[in-house]
Image (tube, coloured by chain):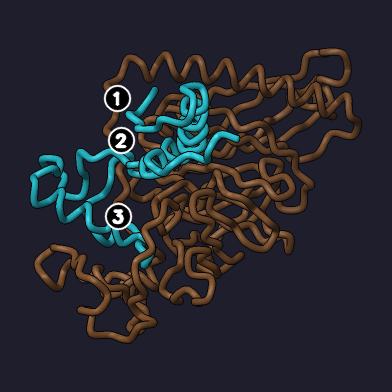
């Protein structure tokens, strides 16, 4: 799996390896999160100050109608993993 | 028929004592609810809801360091016995609020099994025949069948006494079985004339994992004398229970599948839930942007200056990848 990365300096192999590292670290976490989809009830989880961006998602999802029919606590949103890390610049190749 | 509703108030085995080796976290399940079972270094067995309060990651993949359980995701630490959060690495200088406490279930260890109950209630009752024994817990056998069906099949369960197995397979007598009405089944082998000197009492407890799955946890009344006898007893019971499992699963396949139990998704322990529902951070450490109920379900993402609180309450957001 490859995400689109704008990076002129690193080789494809390096980018692939970096992404596989990230996905490989995230996979066991995402597979063990419960519920599988992001809960929209703000009381279902305990966000802290560092989660400011994450707690902005559920109200947006409610506003966009992304909740499951018959289950207002469940959403159609997948758990994000660390996709943000994939957009961080890579270490320059020595 | 075992009523799963009344089963909530009773004690059930959730693991064998040998499932909890040094600093291991065991993934248990009872009535549709997942539990993280771990033994601390002071020998206390913790049975907790299997979710980190922060992001819902299973605590059974966490790290047991002997005194605390550390979540694998963001490293939140939960204390032995109380399950209170002791350390949040994202905020190393702040002590976590006391309301951040995971849900704990009562636990006790008896007859080589770990017991728990979903609701606080009466103490675990003693079972005749196991009172003064040094018991041997068998391997838990998971069956894809409802607990009441497994109990029905256990009615006719037969096995050989341990000492007869050691005597090169000399045939012991089969015993009659007796079922206790409270969902715990007691099975006592009664030796016949020619095998009177061999006597093994076994009790089989049925742990309902979910409405359609259960685990048979058997306990023999006495640890066999030798290693060979122990091994042959374990093998024999494994064979017999595997045959019983196949029969029960065949019978269960003919029935309609029962509705799975979906426990409500709630965060925290019942004691602190009321407080955490009102304010998960306590009055003095509530971050900006968390007042989703107060302003119409929309989180505030305003900068820290508009918060109107002290600088310590609202530091500039650090949104680096975790």
Q: Which residue bears the numbered disc 2?
A: B260
Any part of residue B238 in sight: yes
**Parent chain of label 1:** B
Taking the view exactly as shown, the residue that stands out farthest to the right is B226
**Parent chain of label 3:** A
Q: Which mark is residue A54?
A: 3
Establish if B5 lies above or below A25.
below
Q: Which residue bears the numbered disc 1?
A: B257
Residue B87: give x, y in percent of width and height: 54, 68
Identify the residue shown where x is 67% and y is 35%.
B202
Any part of residue B129 in sight: no
**Parent chain of label 2:** B
Neighbour tally class for label 1: few under 14, some 14-19, many 20 plus, Cα within 10 Å: few
Residue B223: give x, y in percent of width and height: 81, 38
Establish if B181 lies above or below B89.
above
- Chain B rendering hue: brown
Question: Answer yes or no: do the residues labelled 3 and 1 have beta carbons within 8 Å?
Answer: no
Classify residue B123 by image quadrant. bottom right
Q: CA distance from mark 3 to mark 1?
A: 38 Å
Establish if B214 lies above or below B86.
above
Identify the residue shown where x is 21% and y is 45%.
A74
The chain assigned the colour cyan in the figure is: A
Front of the two marks 3 and 1: 3
Disc 3 is placed on an element classified as: helix
Residue A37 shown left or right of residue B238 in the figure: left
Q: Do discs 3 and 1 share a chain?
A: no
């Amino acid at each position: 799996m490859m995400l689109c990365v704008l990076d002129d300096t690193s080789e494809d192999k390096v980018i692939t390896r970096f992404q596989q590292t990230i996905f490989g670290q995230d996979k066991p976490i995402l597979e063990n999160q419960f519920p599988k989809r992001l809960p929209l009830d703000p009381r279902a989880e305990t966000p802290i100050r560092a989660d400011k961006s994450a707690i902005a998602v559920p109200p947006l999802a409610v506003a966009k109608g992304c909740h499951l029919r018959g289950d207002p606590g469940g959403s159609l949103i997948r758990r994000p993993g660390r996709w943000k890390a994939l957009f961080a610049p890579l270490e320059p190749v020595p | 028929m075992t009523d799963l509703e009344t089963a909530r108030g009773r004690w059930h085995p959730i693991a064998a004592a040998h499932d909890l080796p040094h600093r291991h976290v065991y993934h248990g399940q009872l009535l549709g609810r997942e539990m993280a079972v771990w033994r601390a270094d002071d020998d206390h067995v913790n049975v907790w809801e299997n979710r980190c309060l922060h992001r819902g990651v299973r605590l059974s993949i966490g790290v047991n360091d002997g005194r605390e359980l550390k979540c694998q995701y963001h490293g939140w630490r939960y204390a032995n016995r109380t399950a209170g959060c002791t350390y949040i690495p994202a905020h190393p200088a702040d002590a976590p609020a006391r309301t951040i406490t995971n849900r704990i279930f009562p636990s006790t260890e008896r007859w080589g099994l770990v017991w728990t109950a979903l609701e606080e209630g009466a103490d675990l009752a003693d079972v005749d025949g196991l009172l003064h024994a040094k018991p041997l817990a068998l391997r838990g056998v998971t069956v894809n069948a409802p607990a009441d069906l497994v109990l029905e099949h256990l009615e006719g369960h037969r096995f050989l006494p341990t000492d007869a197995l050691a005597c090169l397979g000399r045939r012991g007598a089969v015993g009659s079985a007796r079922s206790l009405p409270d969902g715990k089944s007691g099975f006592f082998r009664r030796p016949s004339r020619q095998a009177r000197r061999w006597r093994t009492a076994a009790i089989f407890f049925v742990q309902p994992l979910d409405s359609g799955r259960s685990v048979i946890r058997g306990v023999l009344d006495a640890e066999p004398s030798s290693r060979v006898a122990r091994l042959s007893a374990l093998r024999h019971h494994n064979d017999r229970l595997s045959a019983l499992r196949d029969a029960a699963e065949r019978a269960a396949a003919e029935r309609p599948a029962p509705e799975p139990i979906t426990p409500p998704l709630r965060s925290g322990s019942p004691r602190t839930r009321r407080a955490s529902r009102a304010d998960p951070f306590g009055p003095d450490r509530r971050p900006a942007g968390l007042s989703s109920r107060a302003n119409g379900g929309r989180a505030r993402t305003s900068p820290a200056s508009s918060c109107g609180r002290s600088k310590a309450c609202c530091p500039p957001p650090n949104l680096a990848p975790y």
